[in-house]
Amino acid sequence: MNIPITAPIKIMVKRVDDVRIHTFISSYEGDNIANATHIIESKNVLVLVDGQFLKPYAKLFREYADSLKKPIARLYLSHRHPDHWFGLGDAFSDVEIYTLQETIDFLKENGEASREDHIPKLGDLAPDSVVIPKNAVKPGIEVVDGVTYIIEKIVDTEIDYGITLKLPELGVYIVQDLIYSGTHLYLTKYLDHWMAQFEDMLTSDYDLFLPGHGEPADKKEVTENLKYLIAAKQAMADGLKDEAFKSFMLKRFPTRQCPAIFNIYLPRLFDGASDF
């Protein structure tokens, strides 16, 4: 794999009173897929979302969080795909991690196998250990340092189950892999239900969406993601698969970045390969 380690993108996304929202994005180059992780910096503490994929970016994300000079109150893990939890072992083993019970169970059963499976491809960029979150979350409302988090469980989209976080006072919706901002999407069999989530976003009161890949998004990018799924669904209905499908999507969406994502999901989408 061609995985250059270059300087990440750091964005101070939004500020409302004592609260600042930060986004940290890994490289778009080579086989990187622009993983985006986030920090909610309130008056006294930090809340993080996801832990990056590759070891160097996980450590740089932790350095960025530490540079804010506030304790990390918790880290929310959105879902079980390794590009979101691999970095926890190298940079956040001392942090309280919150996620769905299904994600905890998956990591207990499959986390080490996933880590070992990636070592031949990632080498020393893979994590040295697997961290199992100890805190299960359920849909509902949590308040951390005066900031309201609406936790929602989302099923059958880019992943079979995961969480999103709404920050209603800030107008911020942390959707992670429901949106790939400016990059090619990791497609699954759940396109119809995923598209319904986009419809809900477009009619919502939120105007800033924090994705799992790429830069912060607005409703225009939500619409572009919806168009992408519509085109993908039609291509599959027309019988395109594997390299023919990839070629069609690359030509249909020439400006979207991170084409390496096709190599990750195509075997699973069309041949039923393991999804971890």
Image (spheres, rainbow, N blue to C red):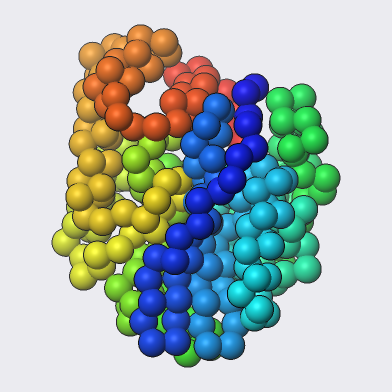
* Vertical placement of residue 229 versus 77, above or below: above
**At 55% across and 27% down in the image, what residue appears?**
30
Give percent across and percent down for residue 50. 58, 58
Q: Quadrant of the N terminus?
A: top right
Specify the farthest residue to the front: 7
Find the residue positioned furthest to the left: 203
Q: Which residue is at 73% across, 62% downward? A: 92
Q: Position of residue 230 (x, y in %)?
A: 22, 32
Q: Where does residue 143 sit, x and y in percent of width and height? A: 49, 85
The vertical placement of 85 against 126, above or below, is below
Seen from the viewer's position, the closer of residues 137 and 172 is 172
The x, y position of residue 63, in whole percent, is 68, 62
Q: Considering depth in this image, is 45 or 150 the residue closer to the camera?
A: 45
134 to the left or right of 239: right
Q: Is residue 45 left or right of residue 23?
A: right
Q: Quadrant of the C terminus?
A: top right
Write the residue at 72% across / 69% down. Answer: 95
Whether 189 is drawn above or below 7: the answer is above
Number of numbered callouts drawn: 0
